[in-house]
Image (tube, coloured by chain):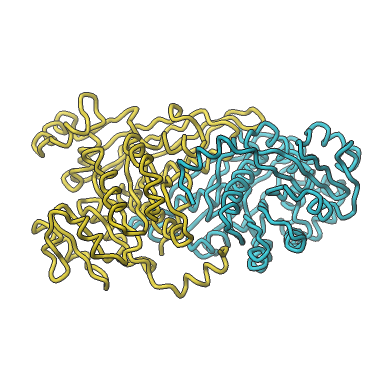
Chain colours: A yellow, B cyan
Amino acid sequence: MSGQVARQARSATQPPMQVGVLGFGGLGQAAARMLVPKQEMMWIAAADQKGYAYTGSGLNWDECVAAYQKGSLGYLEPSGTLSNSSIQDLIQQAGQVEGYFLALPNLPNTFMAEVARQFIQSGWRGVLVDAIKRTSAVEQLLHLSDDLQAAGITYLTGCGATPGLLTAAAAIAAQSYAEIHQVKITFGVGIANWEAYRATIREDIAHLPGYDTESAHQMTDAEVEALLDQTHGLLTLENMEHADDIMLELAGICSRDRVTVGGVVDTRNPKKPLSTNVKITGRTFEGKISTHTFTLGDETSMAANVCGPAFGYLKAGISLHRRGIHGLFTAAEVMPQFVR
Amino acid sequence: MSGQVARQARSATQPPMQVGVLGFGGLGQAAARMLVPKQEMMWIAAADQKGYAYTGSGLNWDECVAAYQKGSLGYLEPSGTLSNSSIQDLIQQAGQVEGYFLALPNLPNTFMAEVARQFIQSGWRGVLVDAIKRTSAVEQLLHLSDDLQAAGITYLTGCGATPGLLTAAAAIAAQSYAEIHQVKITFGVGIANWEAYRATIREDIAHLPGYDTESAHQMTDAEVEALLDQTHGLLTLENMEHADDIMLELAGICSRDRVTVGGVVDTRNPKKPLSTNVKITGRTFEGKISTHTFTLGDETSMAANVCGPAFGYLKAGISLHRRGIHGLFTAAEVMPQFVR
């Protein structure tokens, strides 16, 4: 197995990685749009609840969005197929897909683990990446770790913005310290129109007092609208159940109770209500207490900060898979690779 | 090969990694002191120019410093040996060392590559980590990539603060962007007494106009003192030759001319003259230009920010080595692991 130089030489001559996106709501569409100009990845497969699209020569983003707006990717001509078991059917048909980004809302909270089980049972071998948020959802995947490994699947979980980008930054920052006292993640999200991210907003609402994933999932659009009217479009979230905690614990950096996640989502303004940041406080080997801070530029969107890392981890996962390294990993223990 | 859960279960029962530190000046002593309280690593070997110390049961920091102050680690009783080929002799004797941190000043600028060649020729198989600074020094190691791989050595280069901690943070931050326009590293270092870091300060002086590595290396302490008197103890460095550039280029993130490194070293004050930071500017897939910023806490010392990452990469390198992955890697492509 080879180091950097040999790999660089190889990558210049290699065909693009063939990848798919599961879920085609706001996040899935943004992910696919990000993929289009990439030289190192080709987007050949996608699925929504009612169908899928697949073609070895690469999907067209505008055509896929148009088909989805008619009701499903399954309406795409000639590459679409309507199906009530779209993910399962796509896996069977698109064997050469090397990796998928699971841009699926995890509603109910067991959904992502169920999708992982479908992949395990299918016999497909490749890479899966999610941008899952809840600690309990990552815990479900941990139970599948041995099965993923036995199936020859490399699964990277928690690979969005938070958990993901900010968790990885915290894992890097932790290196200056002998002991980590606190990791505090504070995010600001601004979106012009919540209806472009219906599932994501419901996942956020589920963190509010008096709601859970089930009740948020069941809300009608009118009910979401009524709630947002009460809060002037703002969702203020504190002490959220976020998998950054378990990921940093698994990486041996600190116990999960030292990790806190909160933030403000403005559903009526693309400008962020505050700058997203992570602060890592610890004690150095000399006994000094200090804090490193990683702050995201306000002009970077949720889509850029979620989907960019997701594909960076997908590329890293494909490297691991090609080396025969399978099983479950988190964003805190693998360096994402930049996708050109 | 196994994912996170299986590894966690294993690590709880594994004996500590047996590691060594080469070089026992300011950086090497700080590195060894950092190692002492670690449960996951045991410090069993060290070398300076005139001798080495080695004992399978673990070295005592105070005793090693006392021996070094007498002239060499070789004076340590009963574990020290005086030698004019200390590194070579130590490698031969301490076969069970899994990895070394090369806390050696790279003076002359070919020294680290020469040490790497000694390891390649020795037949020893394990992990080497350096905190090398110059682009040209990393280029020399790149030429050894195939030899390192053939020798069964996993070599991680540029694993200090910058390059290292800040380069890795830049690689993470880059994930939000489709294209990177600039990576700007600005460091502040404050040390109470430059004489504790004689080699490091000479490496810094070598970046000043009118100096090079050779002339800086040849300076007497009195000459260094005279220079620092002229600058009131401050060294202001701009457009430095720093390997962050080649490391980010090799990782495919941006061409090296987009990476700049500069900073201020105060040799008479432990307080940093400015907060060390890296700014990553790029264009998102939606066409927005933005900047992420990673800022180190002022209370973290150069030693904490160099040696902490070095051991984090040493642990990651040992994981790679145990999986049979050899060759040359940089800090921008491997996630460091937290050492408890």
Q: Is residue B211 visible?
A: no
Residue depicted at x 21% and y 54%: A24
State the image quarter where residue A42 is shown. Answer: bottom left
Q: Position of residue B248 (x, y in %)?
A: 53, 59
Residue depicted at x 64% and y 57%: B155
Nearer to me, B198 or A10: A10
Position of residue A204 in the picture relative to residue B197 (left or right): left
Furthest residue in direction bottom, as rendered: A13
The quarter in which the C terminus of chain A is drawn is bottom left
Position of residue B81 in the picture relative to residue B113 (left or right): right
Nearer to me, A202 or A15: A15
Nearer to me, B145 or B26: B145
On screen, B145 above or below A332? below
Q: Position of residue B310 (x, y in %)?
A: 63, 46
Q: Count how many numbered circles sit on residues in the image.
A: 0
Q: Position of residue A163 (x, y in %)?
A: 38, 41
Q: Is residue A302 visible?
A: yes
The quarter in which the N terminus of chain A is drawn is bottom right
Q: Position of residue B269 (x, y in %)?
A: 71, 35
State the image quarter where residue A82 is shown. Answer: bottom left
Residue depicted at x 63% and y 57%: B154
On screen, A140 above or below A311? above
